[in-house]
Image (cartoon, rainbow, N blue to C red):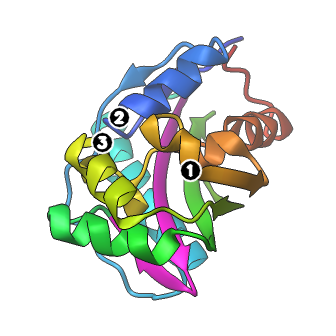
Amino acid sequence: MKSRLILASGSPRRKELLEQIGAEFEILPAKGEEVITSTIPEQVVMELSAQKAEEVAGHYEEESEIVILGADTVVAYENKILGKPKDEADAVRMLQMLSGNTHSVFTGVTLIIKRNGKSEKQSFFAETKVTMYQMTEQQIQAYVATGEPMDKAGAYGIQGKCAIYIEKITGDYNNVVGLPVALVYQNLVKSGIEIL
């Protein structure tokens, strides 16, 4: 039997990735304040994904069979986390840092599985290494001017206009977009949960 799946994120990219695999799900984005107690990228994304999943799970106290999926993605260069740019100058700064270098993209996922009167929580993360071609100052300015980097961790979208500056990736492409759907699915299957 298919489990009811709730995505605790308003990310259009996560929504697209779940639709792409044929999952049926509802969306209830977490709205709470994000609290970070670590500076280690993989711990930060698991912490934030757990906060999102737990907040949304609170809305479904009465449900007996449900899966809540929380996720958070960060870009890290030399172990320094790059979030979403504050403004265009910040986006330029981030792209200058990433240009010609290899960085990591971490997505933390938390699954809260409620069934048979019990609640189980799993948190895990995926890391993908991304190498970018060298970008000229003009290319960086032109890309920032498109507005695309402004709502994205690390100030770029691999599935958008920035694709022309991606030299290679090692790991799961979908993880860079915002959700390692294969890993999520495999973990759900191991727990006996069917979402397709």
Residue receiving disc 1: 165
Instruction: Write the residue at 48% across / 18% down.
Output: 25
Image position of 146 (left or right of 173): left
Which numbered tag is attached to residue 179? none
Say above or below: 141 vs 10. Answer: below
* Residue 143 x/y as whole percent: 33, 48
Q: Nearer the viewer, residue 186 or 3?
A: 186
Helix, strand or loop for disc 1: helix
For the residues carrying marks 2 and 1, which lies nearer the camera in this image?
Answer: 1
Category of crowding for the residue at label 3, using alpha-carbon neighbours closer than 10 angstroms: few (below 14), some (14–19), many (at least 20): some
The answer to whether one can see residue 180 in this image is: no
The answer to whether one can see residue 24 in this image is: yes
Which numbered tag is attached to residue 148? 3
For the residues carrying marks 2 and 3, which lies nearer the camera in this image?
Answer: 3
Q: Residue furthest left?
A: 87
Which comes before the other along the chain, label 2 or label 1?
Answer: 2
Q: Is residue 165 magenta?
A: no
Which comes before the other along the chain, label 2 or label 3?
Answer: 2
> Type of residue at label 3?
Glu
Q: Is residue 73 magenta?
A: yes
Helix, strand or loop for disc 3: helix
Cα gap from disc 3 to disc 1, whole angstroms: 14 Å
Instruction: Write the residue at 74% across / 33% down.
Output: 185
Stretch in magenta: 66-83
Magenta portion: prevailing SS class:
strand
- Image quadrant where one finds the N terminus: top right
Residue receiving disc 2: 60
Image position of 88 (left or right of 7): left
